[in-house]
Image (cartoon, helix red, strand yellow):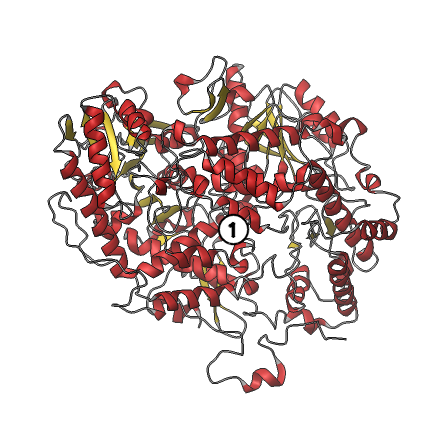
Amino acid sequence: MMQREGRPTASGSGKMSAIGTISGDRGLDHEEPLTFELGRSGAVGVDLPDCEVSDKRLGGLRRREPTGLPGLSEPEVVRHFVRLSRMNYAIDSGLYPLGSCTMKHNPRLNEKMARLPGFADVHPLQPQKTVGGALAIIGELMRWLKELTGMPAVAMSPKAGAHGELCGLLAIRAALEARGEKRRRVLVPSSAHGTNPATAALVGFDVVEVPAKNDGHVDADALEAMLSADVAAIMLTNPNTCGLFERRVIEIAEHVHSAGAYFYCDGANFNAIAGRVRPGDLGIDAMHINLHKTFSTPHGGGGPGAGPVVLSDALAPFAPLPLLASDEAGLRLIEDRGAVQSGGEPFGRMCAFHGQMGMFVRALAYMLSHGIDGIRQASEDAVLAANYVLASLRDVMSAPFEGPCMHEALFDDRFLEGTGVTTLDFAKAMIDEGYHPMTMYFPLVVHGAMLIEPTESESRESLDRFIRVLRALAAAAQAGERERFVEAPRYAPRRRLDETAAARRPVLRYKSNSLAQAAE
Amino acid sequence: MRYLPLTPDDRRHMLANIGVADVDALYRDVPRSATAPRSIFSLPDTQGELEVERYLSRLAQSSMSAGSVPFFCGAGAYRHHIPAAVDHLIQRSEFLTSYTPYQPEIAQGTLQYLFEFQTQVALITGMEVANASMYDGSTATAEAVLMAQRVTRRPKAVLSGGLHPHYAETVETVAALAGTVVRAAPLPGRAENLIEMIDDQTACVVVQSPDVFGLIRDLRPLAQAVHARGALLIAVVTEIVSLGLLEPPGAMGADIVAAEGQSIGNALNFGGPYVGLFATRDKFVRQMPGRLAGATADADGKRGFVLTLSTREQHIRREKATSNICTNSGLCCLAFTIHLSLLGEEGFTRLARINHARASRLADRLLKIDGVELVTPAFFNEFTLRLSKPAAAVVDALADRDILGGVPASRLFPHESRADDLLIVAATETVTDEDCEAYSRGLAEVLA
C-alpha cells in the first residue's frame, strides 16, 4: 500500500534538515521574499503609454514624492503569488475542521456565474432600468432566505456576519425607540462568539453574560430570571457554539417576548439545520446568515463575506436602506428615506450601495444547485459527519457533553491531563499530519476546547482517515510522546511563530531594516 | 447531489456506528413543532450545473453591462482594466478556499500578502501604518470616526458636504449612537468652510478628496485648524488611483485615511464586494479597528508573519474590542495587492496620468456643447457638469441610446433641488475616443 501519511516534500528535522540546501529552498518548498525585496525601479507588469499631463486642473496638488512601490514584471508577480499560495492550507487541498467556520466545498460554478458581465461589470448607480438582472438576483436570493428561515423580511446590505449583527441590533434599538423605550441591557451567553458582545457594546448596550449549564445548554432559568424591563434583547447562537441545539429555545423566545425584549439569533451555525428547521418557527426576531458559511461563498483567506439579516414583522419596518421593492413595474431599489412606503422607518444605512452582489450570485448558484432537497441533505450530512466523529473519538478524547451534537463535535482537554501536551500542542501536531487544526480554545465555557466541524463535504473514507489520525495522536500523547507535540509543527512552511515578539515590537509594514530586526 | 460525497450506504453505516436508527434521532433536541417538513418550503429541488448556468446566464443578460456600452459612471465605484493575471491568481485554491490565517504556520501565503498590502496602502496614502482591510470605503470611514471618538474622547464628528452621501449616512448610522454627527451642506465645485464648525467637542473632521463631485481639495489648511483644536482629520478617498498623481493625504496632515480600494484589482460588482483601506499614524495603532499582519520569527529563526495586536479585537476582547469586525475583505485585498504589484511605481503613476488626461479631454469636448458647464475646476478622473436639463432625465435618455452617461447628483442628494441639473461624469483608462465621441453626440442630442 502506498505511504500516504506525512508530507515527504516538506522541510523536516533530523538528519535531512541538518544537511540543508544551498538555495535555502527545499525541493518544491520555496522561500519567497516580499515584493519590496524583489522589485526594482524600471521594471513594470503592465504596459501603459506614458502621457504627460498639465497642472491646469490639479489644483496645485500634484504628488511631489514618489510612492515607493517596487517594480516587477508580470512573470515575477505571477511566480511570487503562486509561491505564496503554496504556503497556505485550503479546503480544496484537505479537510478543514474549523468549528464555527463551516469550511465546506466551494463549487466553481459559483465563481463562473459571479463573473458574468451582467453581474460583475454592472455599476451600482446605473439607471435602475439597466440593472434588471442584478435586481432579480437580489430578489430571488431574498425569496430563498425568507423561505428557508420562515421569516417575513430580509435586509441584504450587511457585508459579513458581524455587520449583520450590527444591523439586527440597530433595528432592535430603533424598534425600542419607536416604542418610546430606552432599554440598556443585552443578554449574551458566555459561550457566544466574540462578535456578539462587541456588537452589543458598539450599539451602546451593556452586555450581561448569561451562564451556561453543565450540559452545554444556556441556562434558561437563569436567563428568565435576568429578563427585566431594562433588557433590550438576547443574542443567542442556535445551534450553539458547543454544537448543541438549544432545546428550550421556543420557551426562551416566549419569555423574551413577554418581557418586551427582542430575540437576536446568531445564524453562524445555520448549516446544521437549513432545510430542516425554520428559525422563524423558533420565535426569533432577527438572524444574520453568513453566506460564506452556510451557502459556500469562499472564505478567501478572511473575506469577503456577506451577512443578510432576516427580520420578524416587529423589526421589518426598521430595515436599513436601500430596500428592494416589488410592484407592477418590477423590482426597484429604494435608496432614500423619503421614498419609503408608509410604515417603513429605516434606521439608517449599513454601507455605500446595495451589499455583496458578488456573494449573492454565488450563494444563489449554490441554492439553485442544491435545491431544497439538497440543502436538507447537506444539513443532515453535516450533522451526521460531526456525530460520526464524536462517536468515533469520544473513547480516546474527552467530550464534555452528551451527544448527539449538531454539525460540530466539541472536545475538551481532559484527555491530555498529565501528558504535558496542551490543546495548542495537539492542534499543531495535526498540522504535521497534514490537517488544518480544529478551532481551539473556543467556546470559552469548556477548558482547552477543540471544536471540530467536518461539514458535509467529506467522504466516509476522508472522515475515517481523519479519525484514525486523531486517535493515534491521542494515544501518542497519552503514551508520553511529548516531543511530537511540543515541537510541532515540523513539516509546515514555518515552525511556531513568536507572537509575543510580534505584539511587543510591532513590525506592520516593510521598511528596509525593519524585517531584519523582526527575524532576530 | 454532486457536491455531497456520502452515499446512502455510507449514511447507513455511519448511523449504525453512532448507534441511532436514523438521522432524525440526531435532531432529537429540536422541538417537534419546529421541525419543518420538506413540503413547507416552496422551493425547487436539485438542479444540474447546466440548468443553473442557463438560468443565471439569462438573468445576467437582462442587465446592461458597463463593458458593452460607452460608460462614464463613478461616484464611489470605478471601472478600470484588471490585468488577466489578477483574476487567475486570486482563484488559486490556496487563496480562494482558505480561512482567516489563525494558524500562521500553514497560512504564510495569506499573511505575507496582507503584510504587503498594508505596506502598499501605507505608501500610497502617505501614512505610517495600515490594517488588513475593512468591508469597503464607507464602513472604513465609519470606523475611522468611531476611532477618532475613542482617541479624543470627544463626541462630535463634522462631515464635509463633499463626502459621498452614502458614506455620510453610514457614518451617521453608527457614530451618532454615542456622539453627534453634523454634516455640512454640499457646495458642488467649492470647498466649504469647515473650520467654523469645529469646537472643543469635535473629535474629527471628515473630508473627501477628490470629493463626491470630483473636486480635488487641499487638506493642508484644514489639517492645521483641526489639529489646533485637538481634533483629528479623517481623509476619505473613493478613487484610490488618484493617489498616483495627487498629493497623498498623509502628506497633507491627515490623521486617518479611510478609502475605497475597489479601483485596483476589483470589478464593479454592482456595489460589492469591495475593499476598505484604513491607514493612520503609528501612535494610534492600538486604537485601530480590524486585523493587522505583523512580521516575526519562527522557532528556527526564519522570518514569518502572524496576525498581531489581537488584543484590540472582538475574539479576544469581546465587548471591549475596538470594533466588532471579524471577516473583512481578504480576497479583495489580494486582488488589490496583485494589481498594484503589477503596476508598481511606474504603472501606478502612468495609470493615474492617463485617467486624468482622459477625463480632461472628455470635459473639454463636452464643454463645447450648448447647455453644459463645468462645475469642478480641479478634478482627477471625474468632474461635475451643470446641464440645461434635469440630469436624471438626461441619463435616462442616454441609457435609451445605450450610453451609461454618469450619475445624476439627484440620485445621491434627492432632497437638494440645486443638485437636479448636476451630472457626475467619470472617465478612466477604459474609455476610448469612440466612447467619448458617442457620448458627446448623445449628450448634444438629448440637450438640444
* Residue under numbered circle 1: A302
Circle 1 residues within 10 Å: few <14, some 14–19, many ≥20: many
- Compared across the picture, whether A510 is left or right of A389 comes to left
Q: Quadrant of the N terminus of chain A?
A: bottom right
- Residue A499 position, x and y percent, is 51, 62
Q: Is residue B177 above or below residue A364?
A: above
Q: Nearer the viewer, residue A55 or B110?
A: A55
- Circle 1 SS class: loop
Camera-nearest residue between B75 and A392: B75
- B280, B319: nearer the viewer: B280
Q: Can you give x and y, in whole percent of width and height, for residue A355 in the image?
A: 47, 36
Name the chain under label 1.
A
Q: In which quadrant of the rendered view does residue B189 lie?
A: top left
Residue B228 visible: no
The residue closer to the viewer here, B17 or A231, is B17
Q: Is residue A194 above or below residue A339?
A: below
Point out residue B124 in the picture as x, y percentages from the top left corner: 29, 54
Instruction: Describe residue A7's horizontal placement relative to residue B119 as left or right.
Output: right
* Placement of the C terminus of chain A among the 4 image quadrants: bottom left
> Which residue appears farthest toward the top when viewing the image?
A342
The reply to whether residue A91 is visible in this rendering is yes
Give residue A262's position: percent from left, percent from top. Answer: 61, 24
Q: Is residue A305 placed above or below A20 in the rendered structure? A: above
Question: Which residue does the image show at 47% across and 65% down from the upper left?
Answer: A82
Amino acid on which disc 1 is placed: Gly
Q: Is residue A334 above or below residue A28?
A: above
